[in-house]
Amino acid sequence: MQKELDFYLQHRKKLIAMHYVNFVIGWDMQTDAAENSILANSEQAAVISEMSYNLTTDPEYERSVGVLFKHRDELDEVLRHEIEVVYKDIQDTKKIPLDEYMAYSELTSQAYPIYVRAKNENNFELFRPYLEKIVEFCRKQTVWLQTSKVKGYDVLLDMYEPHYNQKKYDQFFKVLRKKLVPFVKRKTKKPVKVPKWATQTFEKEKQREFCEYIRDVMCFDKSRGIMKESEHPFTSGFGTDDVRITTHYYEDHLEYAIFSAIHEGGHATYEQQCDKSLNGTFSGGGASLGLHESQSRFYENIIGRSRAFWEVHYPKLQEIFAPKLNKVSLDQFVKYINRAEASFVRTEADELTYPLHIMLRYEIEQKVIAGELEVKDLPKYWNEKFTEYFGITPPTDTLGVLQDVHWAYGNFGYFPTYALGSAIAAQLYHHMNKDFDVEESLKEGTTKKINEWLRERVHKYGASKYPDEILRLATGEDFNPNYYVDYLIKKYSKK
C-alpha cells in the first residue's frame, strides 16, 4: 500500500496546483477582469477543465485511491476521511462525459459577465439562454450522478451539504413554517419607515475605511489576505495563508458594505483558523457550505447586529462619517440595523425575514430541477411566489429573479445551506454562552475570544470530518433548528 500512498501524495500536488489555477482565475474574473476580457478568455476555462478532469480520472490515480479506500482503516483519521471523499469525487467525475464537462466550464465562464449586465440592465432575456443551458446541464448531472439512494435534486443538495437531502431540508423548513413564519408575518405587517439620516450619501472611500477597520476588529490577518470589491460579495481562499474577501459599496445604503464585510469576514476567519497542517491536502478549508454559512451568519447577525458590538464600534463609524451621524444615537442606529420588514433583496434582508428568502429559492429549485418549471417562466413564477411569501411584488427582475449570482455559476442546491447555516449559528451561540458571556467579551474591542472558541471547536478541523460530526463535537448534540427559532423570536419579541 505504500506505493499507492506515495503516488497519491504526489498526484495530489498536481490537483491542488490545478485548484490554485482555478482559484486565481475565479478571483480575477469577479474582481479585476473587464467583461470583454472574460468572454475572450472563456475558452481557456474549457482547456483547464479538461486538464483537471484528466488529472482526476487518471487511471493510476484512480487505482491508487481504490487501494487506499479498500485499506482506509489502516490510515490515520484525517487521511481516511480524505480518501473517502476523494474516492466518491473520482467516481462522480467519471460519470460526467468529458465534452459536457468542458463545455459547461466554458459556459459558466461566459455566463457570469452576461449575468452582471442583465442584472444591471434589468434584462432577464439577455441572461435566459445561458441559464437554460446551465439548467439543462444540472438536470443531466442529477441523472449521471444518481445512485440507488440519492436521486434528482438530492444529488445537487449532497454536493453542497453531505448527508442532507430534501427529506431533511423539508423537515427543517417545516419547523420554520410552523413556528417562525406566523411570527414573521405579524412582525412585518406594518411597513418600516426609513429614517432620514439613513438616506444620506455615504462616500464609498469612507465606507471602505470602516470596512478595513472591521477587518481589524475581527482579527483578520491582513498579511494573509486582502479585500476588494465585486458585484456580489464573496470569500475565496487557498489554504490558511491566502484568504480573500470582497464587498460592494452603495453610497445610498451604508449598512450593505458593512454587513457584507462582516459576513465575508466570518468566512475568512474560518479559513484562516483551519489547522495549518491541513494546507496542501484536500482536508483544508470549510467542511461544507452549511457549516461555512454558519460562521458568516453568526458574525454578521448574532455578533454584528448586537448592541454590545456597536457600543464599542459605533463611535468609530460616527467619527468616519462626521457630521452625518453625529445626531444619530446608538439606540437609533441599532434599531435601524435590526429592523424587520418585507424586502426584495436576500442579501439586504434582516435576519428575521431571511429564511423566507431561502425557502422561496429552495422551492423554485426543486421545481426547476424536476422539470416542473422552465427557465422562461421563472420571472413570473418568482414574482407570484414572492408576493405570496412577503405580500409585496418585485418591481423589476433586478430586484427579483436576477438578484443572486448563484445560478450563473450553476450552483443549484446551494441556497438551502444559507438557512441551515443560520440555524447552526444559533446552536453554536447557545453553547458558546455556556462557556463565557459572549456579549461581555465584545467589550475587549475585538472578536478574539469568540474566534478562539470557534477555532478549537469548529475551525481547526477544516474539512477533515463531515460537518454533522463537527457540529456534534462542538455542541454535544445533533442539529436542532429550535435554537434558531427561539433565538429569533426572543430577539424580535423585544421590539
Image (tube, rainbow, N blue to C red):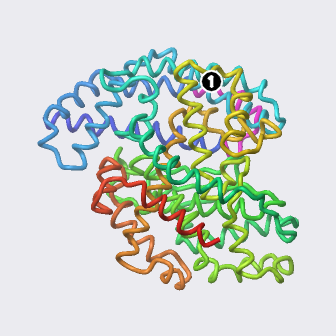
Q: Which residue is pictured at 84% across the width and 35% down the height?
A: 121
Asked if residue 138 lies left or right of residue 324, the reply is left
**Quadrant holding the N terminus:** top left
For label 1, the residue is: 107
Asked if residue 467 lies left or right of residue 265, the reply is left
Asked if residue 161 is among those painted magenta in the image, a careful observer would answer no
Residue 223 visible? The answer is no
> Residue 470: percent from the left, percent from the top?
32, 55
| Residue 205 position (above or below residue 234) | below
Asked if residue 83 lies left or right of residue 351, the reply is left
Q: How many marks?
A: 1
Q: Nearer the viewer, residue 48 or 96?
A: 96
Q: Within 10 angstroms of label 1, few (less than 14), some, or many (20 or more) residues?
A: many
| Residue 158 position (above or below residue 459) | above
User: Which of the 4 image quarters holds residue 127?
Assistant: top right
Residue 190 visible? The answer is yes
Q: Amino acid at mark 1?
A: Leu
> Residue 244: percent from the left, percent from the top?
57, 55
Which residue range is magenta in the image?
A: 30-45
Asked if residue 39 is among those painted magenta in the image, a careful observer would answer yes
**Quadrant holding the C terminus:** bottom right
> Residue 456: percent from the left, percent from the top?
34, 67
| Residue 1 position (above or below residue 333) | above
Q: Which residue is pictured at 40% across the width and 74% down the height?
A: 433
Q: Nearer the viewer, residue 219 or 125?
A: 125
Label the magenta part by its dominant secondary structure. helix
| Residue 92 position (above or below residue 226) | above
